[in-house]
């Protein structure tokens, strides 16, 4: 089998799709993995910070997260991390993604650990971490909204952070917006700390503006 197909990203996507699909309609099984702050606090089931990233609410939720992870994750894993972070790049990439899932749940745990009605699931925190690591490397590279509309990553990232912060303040839906925000910050900061030279490089590239100016 092609070694490219066995990337950490592709294996993670495969496992996440399998677990999510098997448990999509299995509420009892999903209940053992879901992020439920009250249960974590009472029973010390800290593993839920991570296992919640392997289950999703529905097929659309799963498809969006896994497509974005596949798109950005392979680039980060195969090029950016080995090129800029050198030794133990695979382990650092795993810290980026799985650390993002965990870090994204911390604000929700602190806010809801006495609220029995709150629960969350999905890999959005880890996916956000991967996307914002990509922004650190190439701020003006385009990403394509709906696969068609080109938007520079740095602008899309800024809009995403503002939207997540604003939506969390309004709190009118069941989406864990602050988890998205925290995962994004984790991806950007954790990657930069692994190679501090990336921060001044990012600032320089950001100030240069897009190449088409």
Image: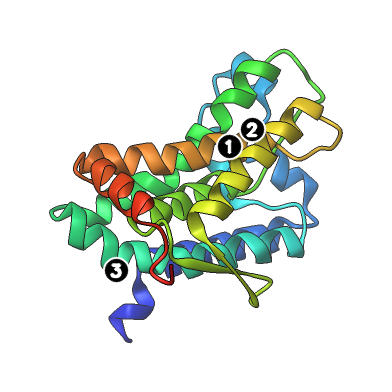
| Mark 3 → mark 1, Cα distance in angstroms | 25 Å
Observer-nearest of 79 and 94: 79
**In the current view of this chain or complex, which residue is farthest to the left?**
87
User: Residue at the location (13% across, 53% down)?
Assistant: 87
| Mark 2 → mark 3, Cα distance in angstroms | 29 Å
Write down the residue under mark 2: 178
What is the number of the mark on residue 147?
A: none
Residue 157: image x %, image y %?
54, 49
**176 versus 67 height, above or below:** above
Residue 102: image x %, image y %?
49, 35
Write down the residue under mark 1: 181
User: Residue at the location (77% across, 17% down)?
Assistant: 115
Q: Is residue 66 visible?
A: yes
Residue 135: image x %, image y %?
42, 54
Residue 200: image x %, image y %?
25, 42
Q: Quadrant of the C terminus?
A: bottom left
Q: Quadrant of the N terminus?
A: bottom left
Write down the residue under mark 3: 78
SS at mark 2 in the image: helix
Q: Are marks 1 and 2 in contact (CB under 8 Å)?
A: yes
Q: Residues within 10 Å of mark 3 (few under 14, many from 20)?
A: some
Q: Residues within 10 Å of mark 1 (few under 14, many from 20)?
A: many
User: Residue at the location (72% across, 39% down)?
Assistant: 31
First-in-chain label (3 vs 1): 3
| Mark 1 → mark 2, Cα distance in angstroms | 5 Å
Horizontal arrangement in the rendering, residue 118 relative to residue 127 (left or right): right
SS at mark 3 in the image: helix
**104 versus 94 height, above or below:** above
Closer to the observer: label 3 or label 1? 1
First-in-chain label (2 vs 3): 3
SS at mark 1 in the image: helix
């Amino acid at each position: 089998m092609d070694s490219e197909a066995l990337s950490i990203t592709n294996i993670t996507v495969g496992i996440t799709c399998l677990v999510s699909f098997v448990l999509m309609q299995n509420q009892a099984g999903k209940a053992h993995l879901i992020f439920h702050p009250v249960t974590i606090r009472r029973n010390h089931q800290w593993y839920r910070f991570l296992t919640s990233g392997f289950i999703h609410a529905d097929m659309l939720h799963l498809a969006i997260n896994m497509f974005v992870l596949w798109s950005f994750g392979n680039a980060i894993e195969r090029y950016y991390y080995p090129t800029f972070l050198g030794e133990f790049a695979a382990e650092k990439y795993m810290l980026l993604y799985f650390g993002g899932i965990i870090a994204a749940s911390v604000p929700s745990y602190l806010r809801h650990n006495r609220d029995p009605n709150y629960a969350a699931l999905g890999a959005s925190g880890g996916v956000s971490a991967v996307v914002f690591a990509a922004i650190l490397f190439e701020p003006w590279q385009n990403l394509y909204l709906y696969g068609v509309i080109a938007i520079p990553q740095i602008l899309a990232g800024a809009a995403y952070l503002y939207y997540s912060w604003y939506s969390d303040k309004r709190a009118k839906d069941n989406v864990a917006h602050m988890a998205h925000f925290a995962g994004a910050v984790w991806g950007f900061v954790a990657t930069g700390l692994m190679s501090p030279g990336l921060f001044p490089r990012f600032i320089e590239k950001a100030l240069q503006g897009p190449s088409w100016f």
